[in-house]
Image: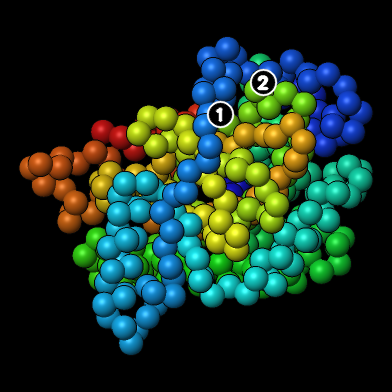
């Protein structure tokens, strides 16, 4: 959520996908993917797969060291072999999860004119619209986004916080606080899986950056021709994804070079390792490429929290993960610079991380 980019960008007219759905007009050319991309969309007709499940209550079981260490091993495998997992028994009140889903959905259901009061200016990432658009030729995602910076307070842009629905701000603030605690705890456990002292990341990251992006995917008559969200890896350290109840399996991740659909687990939160952790661990834990697909009948809402180091922080592989067998894969860089690089480019698989690759 870096400051606005200053170069002028010509992005042309961007159709709002919810409005397109209402008018039942044909899918505009700009949403239709190339043959190559379509073939990967149709390749994923296979049933959704259950990714690793991590039981947070077992990680936190201070009075049961066996249970704790078994779950730490489970977490280690999830991070190393998948880069994605679902946390259950995370301790966040289900009512709060439902409340934030409700206000997000209510926001997306407002008339377009109302939502346009909180515009995402081209080249910026906060507000309502489509992020990561940099040219008129670029393909568009079948998705509406509403993104807000949450932490540190300097990142909060109060003008973009909707007054409708009335309980939006309070609900999001409560949610943000709970998700933040979860991220802090998970990073401690992830440090433990790596044999590092538990507060190593928190100490390294300074005043951490936290942002939320709400993604709303209306149904699309031809899910085989469009992408909900283009393939990418997250520029964060850790990402927490909440899928609204009744969602179909719209999230897809790369596993062993294939796209697989993630089977949603009720009330679980999907966690993934971001680019920062991949760099810090010199590739031991990878930030996995993922995307979202649409459905012909159902809509889908996801609430995605990005948790990342402060922009001031220098990031590079930790010495613990570099030796003769594991030569250093990434250079040292400033995380703010990486964020700007990430936000100044369209979503394009794992290409953004080339910025740091040696
Ligand atoms: C994201 C993301 C996936 C989804 O917002 O970075 O990967 O299912 N979203 O919405
Ligand atoms: Ni993502």
Residue 239 is situated, as x and y percent measured from the top left of the image, at: 50, 54
User: How far is disc 2 from disc 1 in space, using C-alphas?
Assistant: 14 Å
Residue 80 is situated, as x and y percent measured from the top left of the image, at: 30, 49
Confirm whether residue 318 shows in the render: yes
Nearer the observer, 95 or 212: 95
Q: Quadrant of residue 201?
A: bottom left
Name which residue lies at 61% across and 40% down. 250
List the single residue furthest toward the left. Answer: 324
Q: Quadrant of residue 139?
A: top right
Determine whether 112 is above or below 227 in the image.
below
Residue 182 is situated, as x and y percent measured from the top left of the image, at: 49, 69
Query: Pointer 2: what residue?
Result: 225
List the single residue furthest toward the top. Answer: 35
Name which residue lies at 79% across and 33% down. 17
State left or right for residue 42 relative to residue 335.
right
Question: Callout 2: 10 Å neighbours few (<14), some, many (20+)?
Answer: many
Name which residue lies at 65% across and 71% down. 94
Q: Quadrant of residue 7?
A: top right
Nearer the observer, 240 or 138: 240
Residue 208 is situated, as x and y percent measured from the top left of the image, at: 48, 63
Query: Pointer 1: what residue?
Result: 45
| Mark 2: C-beta under 8 Å from nearest atom of ligand 1 | no
Can you tell which mark lies on residue 17?
A: none
């Amino acid at each position: 959520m870096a400051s606005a980019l200053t170069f002028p960008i010509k992005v042309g007219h961007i159709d709002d996908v919810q409005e397109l759905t209402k008018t039942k007009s044909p899918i505009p050319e700009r949403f239709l993917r190339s043959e190559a991309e379509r073939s990967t969309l149709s390749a994923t007709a296979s049933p959704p797969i259950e990714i690793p499940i991590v039981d947070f209550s077992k990680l936190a079981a201070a009075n049961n060291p066996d249970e704790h260490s078994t779950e730490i091993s489970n977490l280690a495998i999830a991070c190393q072999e998948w880069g994605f997992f679902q946390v259950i028994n995370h301790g966040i009140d289900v009512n709060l999860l439902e409340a934030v889903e409700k206000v997000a959905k209510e926001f997306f259901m407002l008339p377009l004119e109302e939502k346009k009061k909180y515009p995402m200016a081209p080249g910026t990432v906060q507000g309502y619209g489509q992020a990561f658009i940099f040219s008129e030729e670029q393909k568009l995602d079948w998705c509406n986004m509403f993104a807000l910076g949450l932490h540190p307070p300097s990142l909060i842009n109060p003008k973009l916080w909707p007054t409708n629905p009335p309980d939006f701000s309070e609900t999001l603030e409560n949610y943000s606080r709970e998700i933040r605690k979860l991220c802090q705890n998970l990073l401690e456990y992830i440090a433990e899986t790596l044999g590092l002292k538990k507060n190593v990341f928190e100490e390294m990251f300074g005043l951490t950056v936290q942002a939320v992006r709400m993604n709303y995917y209306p149904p699309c008559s031809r899910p085989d021709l469009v992408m909900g969200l283009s393939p990418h890896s997250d520029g964060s350290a850790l990402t927490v994804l909440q899928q609204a109840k009744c969602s179909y399996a719209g999230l897809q991740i790369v596993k062993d070079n294939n796209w697989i659909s993630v089977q949603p687990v009720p009330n679980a939160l999907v966690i993934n390792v971001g680019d920062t952790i991949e760099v810090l661990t010199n590739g031991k834990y990878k930030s996995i490429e993922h995307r979202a697909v649409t459905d012909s009948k159902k809509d889908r809402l996801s609430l995605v929290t990005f948790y990342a180091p402060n922009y001031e922080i220098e990031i590079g592989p930790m010495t613990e993960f570099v030796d003769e067998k594991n030569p250093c894969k990434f250079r040292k860089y400033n995380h703010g610079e990486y964020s700007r690089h990430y936000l100044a480019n369209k979503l394009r698989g794992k290409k953004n991380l080339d910025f740091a690759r040696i």
